Amino acid sequence: MSDGEWARHWRPTGLPGVDLLRARYVRHAFTRHAHAGYVLATVTGGVEEVGLPGGPLAAGPGDVVLINPEVPHTARRGAPEGWAYATLYPSGGLVAEVAAEVTALRGTPGFAVSVVADPSTGHLISEVHRAAEAGNALAADTLLRLALARLLRRHGGPLPTREVASAGFADAARARAALEGGLVDPPSLERLAAGVGTSPFALLRAFREAYGMPPHAWLTDARVRRARTLLEAGTPPAETATLVGFTDQAHLNRHFKRIVGVPPGAYRRERADEARRPPARTYKTPDPPSA
């Protein structure tokens, strides 16, 4: 990466249910996208601007960014020097498991705030990365669960639901299903609208209201999600591009990096390398803080 940018996006073999991203970005910007699981990030330098449905928020050192599943968002620098951060992407199952053990929350857990000043928990998130990078799965898993418990106790609640008007929602849901089944050869907006019995502009409004982005942006996000699955299974990037509907590998590279933060080749290599990497024992386990 240029301008002092660097990034590592990986999944430690001894830490199931979570992906890790540690990076410094200056010019890079994340286009609008959403995740199936949660995003928990601590900013360690500079300023990150997170674009959320309610408007942009700034996060600096000591702040923790909390994004619930399927919430569309963007990210870019909020200061000329860019930003550095450590991010956890825990699955819904892992967060629910921790919430059931340490809280009285009922239903699907979530976070009612998106950016909080919480340096101590931010330090825990950074320590998860440090332990995982040293190959200490026991310490990484312990610190991960402590961080999740602390965030859920301090900032957790029932998963917020977006109020979606009933008019048009069924059309948007049918259109989404059609796009899911046609990643490689999707219909035009006109044909998509005709297929669900509405007009293009009515579908566009309904889709934005239901999913936070227009159909073409949602389709790109869905293609990248499918590409991640294929790359994790060892499929080469060029073949992956064809299988998910991108015109070529360059097209995949551009959109993949804008959503995931690293190129598809680096993403695939990290998973292959981690599968072959023997455990290291160079990390001294810290005394676990209270949750």
Image (spheres, grey):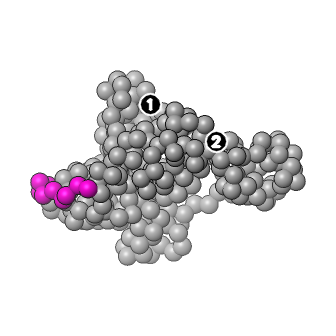
The quarter of the picture where the C terminus appears is bottom left
Q: What residue type is labelled 2?
A: Ala
The quarter of the picture where the N terminus appears is top left
Residue 28 at what x, y percent from top left? 44, 31
From the image, give the main secondary structure of the stretch colored magenta: loop
Q: How far apart are marks 1 and 2 (CA)?
A: 18 Å
Residue 15 lies, with reference to residue 113, above or below; the image says below
How packed mark 1 is, by other alpha carbons closer than 10 Å (few <14, some 14-19, many 20 or more), is some
Left or right of 37 in this view: 42:
left
Residue 278 at what x, y percent from top left? 19, 58
Going from N to C along the chain, the mark reached first, 1 or 2, is 1
Residue positioned 49% across, 53% down in the render: 230
Judge whether residue 64 can be spotted in this image.
no
Left or right of 77 in this view: 272:
left
Residue 153 at what x, y percent from top left? 39, 65
Residue 259 lies, with reference to residue 13, above or below; the image says above
Q: 238 or 150: which is nearer to us?
A: 238
Left or right of 49 in this view: 123:
left
Residue 12 found in image quarter = bottom left
Give the SS element for disc 1: loop
- Any magenta on residue 279? yes
Q: Mark 1 points at which residue?
A: 28
- Callout count: 2
Residue 247 lies, with reference to residue 243, above or below; the image says above
Q: Mark 2 points at which residue?
A: 217
Q: What residue type is labelled 1?
A: His
Left or right of 56 in this view: 261:
left
Residue positioned 62% across, 60% down in the render: 161
State the extent of the magenta-drawn residues as a range: 276-284
